[in-house]
Amino acid sequence: MNPYDHAHALARAIREWEPFQRAKRAKEALEQDEPAKQMVLDFYRRQYEIEAKRLRGEEPAQEELETLRKLFEIVQLHQDARAYLEADLELQRLWMDVQRIVGEPMEDVRLFSLDEIMKEVGRES
């Protein structure tokens, strides 16, 4: 079986996986509750803005971190929003693991590893 066939099989397996099904149900529930959906989107937007600052080498303001923490606490109080965040986190972990696993054979044919390139340009991965 070629890698493309395995990739399609993996996609089917992910769609059938219970955490994926949970994420799908949580997304559908949020799509029916616009205020909750906007709250989750605002949480992600703020989270990504802070992460972007860190990637640029900037330290986020304490106020930004506190706002994100408070928003997270509020999101956790809403059952559908909390379910969505939990399911999304589980799927993100899966995706990172799959990328790591699938990327391992590529290291056998690369001239430089990502770590070596990042060190060369002055950044740690």
Image (cartoon, rainbow, N blue to C red):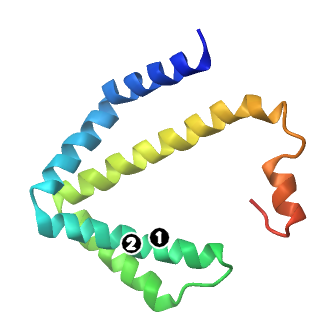
Of 65 and 117, the residue lying toward us: 117
Amino acid type at circle 1 is: Tyr
Q: Residue at x 34, y 71 (%)?
A: 43
Q: Residues within 10 Å of mark 2 (few under 14, many from 20)?
A: few
Query: Which label is found at residue 48?
Result: 1
| Left or right: residue 110 compared with residue 56 | right
* Disc 2 residue type (three-letter): Arg
| Residue 63 or residue 56, whichever sits in front | 56
| Pointer 1 with pointer 2, Cβ within 8 A | yes
Relative height, residue 1 to residue 65 (above, below): above
| Image quarter of residue 105 | top right
Q: Give the residue number, with chain letter if any, for mark 2.
A: 45
**49 or 73, nearer to the observer:** 49
Give the side of residue 64 with respect to residue 42, left or right. right
Residue 60, x across and y down, in percent: 55, 85
Residue sitting at x 32%, y 24%: 16
Residue found farthest to the left: 32
Q: Secondary structure at mark 1?
A: helix
Q: Residues within 10 Å of mark 1 (few under 14, many from 20)?
A: few
- Residue 86 in percent (x, y) is at 33, 51
The C terminus sits in image quarter: bottom right
